[in-house]
Amino acid sequence: MEITGKNIVITGGARGMGRRFAEDLQRAGAKPYVLDVVQENLDVLKAETGIEGQVVDVSNEAAVEAFFEQFTAANGAVDVLINNAGITSDALFIKQKGDEITKFPFANWEKVINVNLTGVFLCAREAAYHMVKNKIKGVIINISSISRAGNLGQTNYSATKSAVDSMTVTWGKELSRYGIRVGAVAPGYINTEMVAKIKQEVLDKIIEKIPAGRLGEMDEISQTVQFIITNDFFTGRVIEVDGGMRI
Ligand SMILES: NC(=O)c1ccc[n+]([C@@H]2O[C@H](COP(=O)([O-])OP(=O)(O)OC[C@H]3O[C@@H](n4cnc5c(N)ncnc54)[C@H](O)[C@@H]3O)[C@@H](O)[C@H]2O)c1
């Protein structure tokens, strides 16, 4: 698919990698539109780049349905959806310290499942529905993670990201009859605010395990997103961009 002139919706696009995708796609001639839950960051994005967006919680079915209805009525169906919104809420599954044994909090489980799994399901479902209805041969891109392999302290996050991979394969198979392609990118550790939350000593140990010897940069993931959009033979697969690291 040509990028120029396309309607591209990016979830979680008001900061971090999503914002980078939106800016790069705008430079490439697309019409990016961003969904996020932080109005302040949407305002900054609009002021600094002119990129429009609105508050939509991707885990809220009614809000996601209403957004895609309204967007399609105003602009035509979405050509490309980038399911980028994602959060972490780490904990150990069981933790024993002295006599005290704590369990993985259910609240951490639920909140990550809601955004990273249900959110991806809902946005892809609505985007695909309007693509089919409007005969758009669109592209859906899901942002997975190196943690999909199962990462310490990330029962919830790892579960959602491996589910994102399997949904990518499933939708690739199901939607190809409509000309819709589905792909995913599984980034390793990227130089972002999400990674800046990791303690420096832990981060140093992580970097030691990256064969490339450094964190990835956002433009290296953005390039991969654009590859998926433009390569018409790519569907149902996940691209790993992680400097060669295995968790
Ligand atoms: N940073 C990394 O190294 C890394 C590595 C692998 C995968 N990822 C994945 O890449 C994606 C982007 O990561 P990032 O580092 O840019 O994160 P980030 O925290 O900087 O950005 C995530 C954005 O999603 C928004 N968001 C959160 N909940 C939302 C909701 N319910 N509805 C809509 N928007 C919501 C946030 O407000 C934020 O703007 C995530 O899916 C993440 O899991 C990141």
Image (spheres, grey):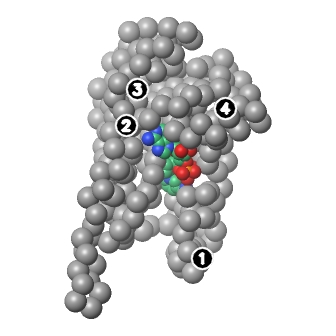
What crowding class fits label 1: few (fewer than 14 Cα within 10 Å), some (14-19), or many (20 or more)? few
- Viewer-nearest residue: 94 or 226: 94
Asked if disc 4 and disc 2 are in contact, CB closer than 8 Å, the reply is no
Residue beneath label 1, please?
Answer: 200
Quick one: SS at disc 1?
helix
Asked if disc 1 and disc 3 are in contact, CB closer than 8 Å, the reply is no
- The picture quadrant where one finds residue 181 is top left
Q: Nearer the viewer, mark 1 or mark 3?
A: 3
Q: Earlier in the sequence, mark 4 or mark 2?
A: 4
**Image coordinates for residue 237, horizontal then vertical, percent:** 40, 41
Residue beneath label 2, please?
Answer: 59
**Image coordinates for residue 130, horizontal then vertical, percent:** 41, 15
Give amino acid for label 4.
Answer: Leu
CA distance for labels 4 and 2: 25 Å
Q: Earlier in the sequence, mark 4 or mark 3?
A: 4
Q: Name the disc covering residue 25, or none.
A: 4
Residue 208 visible in the snapshot: no
What crowding class fits label 4: few (fewer than 14 Cα within 10 Å), some (14-19), or many (20 or more)? many
Measured along the vertical axis of the image, is residue 70 above or below residue 215?
Answer: above
Q: Is mark 2 within 8 Å of ligand 1?
A: yes
- Viewer-nearest residue: 191 or 50: 50
Give amino acid for label 1.
Answer: Gln
Residue 40 visible in the snapshot: yes
Residue drawn at x 53%, y 77% as measured from the top left: 202
Residue beneath label 3, please?
Answer: 63
Q: Is mark 3 within 8 Å of ligand 1?
A: no
What crowding class fits label 3: few (fewer than 14 Cα within 10 Å), some (14-19), or many (20 or more)? some
- Viewer-nearest residue: 36 or 19: 36
Asked if disc 2 and disc 3 are in contact, CB closer than 8 Å, the reply is no
